[in-house]
Every structure is written in structure tokens, then in C-alpha cells.
Image (tube, helix red, strand yellow):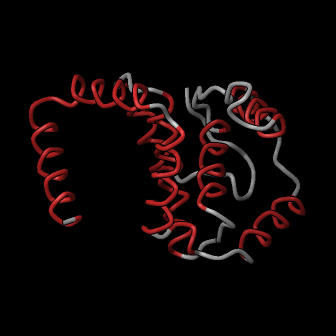
């Protein structure tokens, strides 16, 4: 189950961990649980707690926090990410399943100050939209379709209705 990680920047907020635990209890996927940590990270960048070089970096920090907090989110498969990223993800995953001592204060401070020097545009609505579109483009049409079909099955009548209204608004705005 989810637990607290014990290092400086990596420490997630209590509410985030609780939201992720609730997702786990509801039987939601690890990626949904990890989404709570990514959301928290975006809020941190927006409110100026620290910055991020890119949207991708902010997402990566959130995923790392999730793994270190005990979310069973597997490392990316070979060919999906670099060897270094995959190694780091599996390290974070191991870290989440074991209790370890505190990270050195010097290391924590170095990470924090490095992130504080970065900008805050990475978490803007525009940057997130660009990241989402580019991530979607990398997926095949059949993959996107199966995800949409799964959403239809799991959303329920109320969720479907509100999603349809949102889609209609988006289309109207695009015109």
C-alpha cells in the first residue's frame, strides 16, 4: 500500500497520498493513482514552490513521487523510454516498497535549489495541452479508440453525459 517517502522534495502532501489510496481502494489503475501525484506537482510549479524545465520533467517528478510512495506503477517497457529513465523508474519502485533512511540534507537542498531556478511555464494550460497532444499523437488510432471505449464502459451514465457536454463545448470553441 502507499506510504510516505522520506526525502526533501519527494515528500508528497498528505491529501495527495490519501486521494491516491482512495483510488487504490476503488480498484483504479496505478496510472490513475499516479495521476494524483502529477496533479500535485503541476500545482507546485504553478504556485511557485519550484519550477520545471519542461512539462515532461514536471510529469516525471510526479511519477517518481508516486512510485516512491508505493504506487505499483511499472517502469516503462524497453523502447518506450531511455535505459536511464527505465533504471530510475525501477529504482523508485524498489524505494517505494522498502523503508529507507532519510536522504542527506545537502542532496535535498541541491535538488530543491536546482528546481527553484527553473521556470513556471511548464505547468501552464498551454504547455499541458501541447504535451497531451504530442503524447496522443505517439499512440496508434486503435490504442486511442480502445481507451475511449474503456472510458465509455467505466464512466457511467452521468459521467458520459457530462463528457458529451464538455466535448460539445470544446467543438463549439474550436469553430
Q: Is residue 73 above or below residue 51?
A: above
Q: Residue at x 88, y 54 (%)?
A: 104
Instruction: Give residue 94's quadrant in the image.
Output: top right
Q: Residue at x 68, y 43 (%)?
A: 5
Q: Is residue 67 above or below residue 105?
A: above
Instruction: Give residue 57's quadrant in the image.
Output: bottom right
Where in the figure is residue 120, as x and y percent of width and height? 59, 75
Q: Is residue 163 above or below residue 98?
A: below
Q: Residue at x 72, y 36 (%)?
A: 81
- Give the quarter of the figure containing the N terminus: top right
Where in the figure is residue 114, as x and y percent of width and height? 79, 70
Instruction: Give residue 20's quadrant in the image.
Output: top left
In front: 145, or 66?
145
Residue 10 horizontal side relative to residue 151, left or right? right
Q: Residue at x 54, y 40 (%)?
A: 138
Where in the figure is residue 41, as x and y percent of width and height? 55, 58
Where in the figure is residue 109, as x and y percent of width and height? 82, 66
Number of marks in the rendered image: 0
- Give the quarter of the figure containing the C terminus: bottom left
In front: 37, or 162?
162
Amino acid at each position: 500500500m502507499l506510504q510516505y517517502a522520506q526525502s526533501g522534495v519527494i515528500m508528497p502532501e498528505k491529501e495527495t497520498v490519501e486521494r491516491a489510496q482512495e483510488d487504490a481502494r476503488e480498484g483504479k489503475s496505478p496510472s490513475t493513482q499516479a495521476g494524483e501525484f502529477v496533479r500535485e506537482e503541476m500545482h507546485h510549479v504553478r504556485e511557485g514552490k519550484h519550477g520545471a524545465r519542461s512539462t515532461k520533467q514536471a510529469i516525471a517528478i510526479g511519477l517518481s513521487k508516486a512510485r516512491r510512495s508505493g504506487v505499483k506503477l511499472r517502469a516503462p517497457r524497453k523502447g518506450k523510454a531511455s535505459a536511464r529513465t527505465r533504471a530510475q523508474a525501477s529504482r523508485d519502485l524498489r524505494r517505494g516498497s522498502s523503508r529507507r533512511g532519510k536522504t542527506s540534507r545537502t542532496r535535498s537542498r541541491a535538488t530543491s535549489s536546482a528546481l527553484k531556478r527553473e521556470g513556471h511555464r511548464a505547468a501552464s494550460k498551454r504547455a499541458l495541452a501541447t504535451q497531451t497532444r504530442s503524447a496522443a499523437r505517439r499512440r496508434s488510432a486503435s490504442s486511442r479508440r480502445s481507451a475511449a471505449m474503456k472510458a465509455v464502459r467505466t464512466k457511467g451514465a452521468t459521467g458520459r453525459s457530462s463528457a458529451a457536454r464538455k466535448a460539445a463545448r470544446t467543438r463549439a470553441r474550436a469553430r
